[in-house]
Image (cartoon, helix red, strand yellow):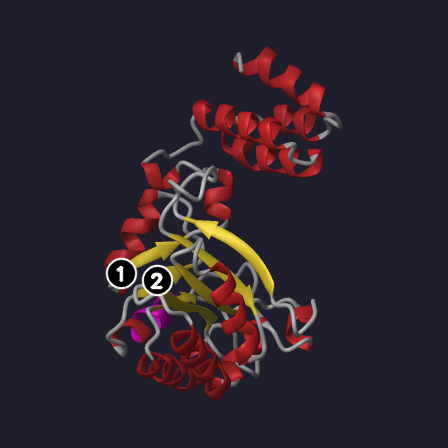
Amino acid sequence: MSPSRPYMSLTNCGRCSSPEIDRPLVVQFAANRSQDLADAACIVSPFADGVDLNCGCPQRWAIAEGYGACLINKPELVQDMVRQVRNQVEHPNFSVSIKIRSLDISGRNPTRIHKDLARTVDLCRKVEATGISWVTVHGRTIEERHQPVHYDTIKIIKENLNIPVIANGDIRSHKDIDYVRQFTGVDGVMAARGLLANPAMFAGYDETPLQCVRDWVDIALEHGTPYTCFHHHLMYMLERITSKQEKKIFNALSSMSAVLDYLYDNYGL
């Protein structure tokens, strides 16, 4: 990842198909220089509805390069990034948002995330004053991976801001959505692994419907999706609806034709 060429990934609110119908569409960037982010935002602004700055990635390589979660220690830089995008993108309704983790540099007491919560709130207030559209908060520190999510931290951040706050972390079902929204008072939720396992979760499904699997197969075949990606996503989708033995068989498949045969034989797809 070159500092002069920010990394880009596309995320949207529904099924991946066409930018003409999957709206709103927000492009997330990892960047460490204000002009880089502004240039990238200008490039995508005709095709997207907003950009999001990743200030939450905990991977060591990203932090070493000055991307991701290390930015939560640089509130002035994040402010300037938001300001430059606002000044240079001409579309008046173009959103600018950030995704963060809660700040806890020591990591010695992962159950006491509030150690540096005041600094996290301060960062959010500073970017709020710069004109940010919303903030997404992942309720774990940089050091934490699979520990319980600190929804109490997200609640406090929400109570201290006037802009929308989005909660992220362990959103795997509608029950989780209802609980997090009620407990924290947030304006929305973001899901990652929960949507990998069930891409139809936001449509109200508790398990991945077979139509969703069929749609993914059609999309992958139409666009020539590499086998590894194609198979990996299906492993997630089928996880909740297959037995341990079935998982073992499916996960060991090594070709597109083998996967298609398996889906036809077992699900009629």
The disc label shown at residue 187, or none: 1
Are the residues tagged 1 and 2 within 8 Å (C-beta)? yes
Residue 190 image offset from top left, x and y in percent: 40, 55
* Nearer to me, 162 or 207: 162
Disc 1 secondary structure class: loop
Residue 154 is a magenta residue:
yes
Residue 240 image offset from top left, x and y in percent: 50, 32
Q: Residues within 10 Å of mark 2 (few under 14, many from 20)?
A: many
Viewer can see residue 86: yes
Magenta residues (range): 151-156
Q: Quadrant of residue 106?
A: bottom right
Query: Farthest bottom residue?
Result: 76
Residue 62 image offset from top left, x and y in percent: 65, 70
Give the residue type that dot 2 points to.
Ile
- In this rendering, the answer to whether 191 lies above or below 93 is above
Q: Which residue is mark 2?
A: 166
Who's the residue at 42% across and 55% down the image?
A: 48
